Image: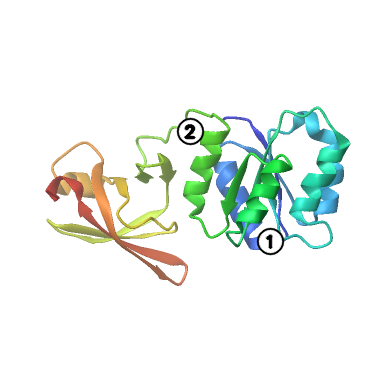
Amino acid sequence: MNGKSVVIVDDSEDYTALLKSKLTKEGFNVKTFLQSEEAFQFVLRSYSEIDLIIIDLMMPNLSGLEFLSTLKDHKLKTNFKICVLSGKNDLLEIETAFKLGASEYFLKSENIDILVEKIYEFMEITSHPTPDKNKEFISLLEITNVIHDFQIVKYDENIVTLYSREELPIHSTIQINSEKLKKYKQTSKPINCIVDNCEILDEKILITCQYLDQIA
């Protein structure tokens, strides 16, 4: 558990809940606000206990940029970092956010697992929680983020197909720790694969992969 304290300010309940769930699983202590004014008052009271603020730029009443500007005017001696979120890639907004004290800028369309990894990088946290090696899991090797909850649909000598609750980037390399699959491949180690296809089906995501050791 890394114990870092994160404040999320976003009026989208679904996105906030998803990001909070991800960060909480990674060991962060997370507090969320749907109203930026309420979040601002909390920051004024508790800034010494905060490590990171993640704020959406498109907030009602007090926008993300206004939040940053007002915070800068208070001239608090803070050590926290600020990450701003936006649904659009606006270079002027990005430049303004950095001038007002932002440390990083993320698009909300970005894969949330990659976003979490970038948070690790710019907060200089070097290691992720280690999964229980006795349990089945999928690990996205590029970002070492462990993804639990998967169900193998079928496999043969060329491919493996599975359901996951997480989207995986096409051509990303994953590691599947499945006793059934390891027995089939006659190995005691997790199976390395590369993602060929990722298809969203209702609440599940269908992932098709090739075994990495068979790719020239």
Question: Which residue does the numbered mark 2 point to in the structure image?
Answer: 129
Q: Can residue 73 be seen?
A: yes
Judged from the image, the secondary structure of the residue bearing numbered disc 1 is: helix
Q: Amino acid at mark 1?
A: Glu
Image point 71% across, 60% down: which residue?
Answer: 58
Q: Position of residue 71 (x, y in %)?
A: 82, 41
Picture layout, residue 74 above or below residue 181:
above
Q: Can residue 54 be seen?
A: no
Q: Nearer the viewer, residue 72 or 33?
A: 72
Residue count near mark 2 (Cα–Cα under 10 Å), binned few <14, some 14–19, many ≥20: few
Q: Position of residue 118 (x, y in %)?
A: 51, 41
Specify which label sits upstream in the sequence, 1 or 2.
1
Is 173 placed left or right of 44 in the picture? Answer: left
Q: Amino acid at mark 2?
A: Pro
Q: Nearer the viewer, residue 201 or 68?
A: 68
Judged from the image, the secondary structure of the residue bearing numbered disc 2 is: loop
How far is mark 1 from mark 2, CA to CA? 26 Å
Label 1 close to label 2 by CB (< 8 Å):
no
Q: How is the image coloured?
A: rainbow
In which quadrant will I find the N terminus?
top right
Image point 68% across, 61% down: which residue?
Answer: 13
Question: Which residue does the numbered mark 1 point to in the structure image?
Answer: 13
Q: Nearer the viewer, residue 29 or 154?
A: 29
Q: Position of residue 23 (x, y in %)?
A: 58, 43
Image point 33% across, 58% down: which residue?
Answer: 170
Is 109 placed left or right of 75 in the picture? Answer: left
Picture layout, residue 198 above or below residue 188:
below
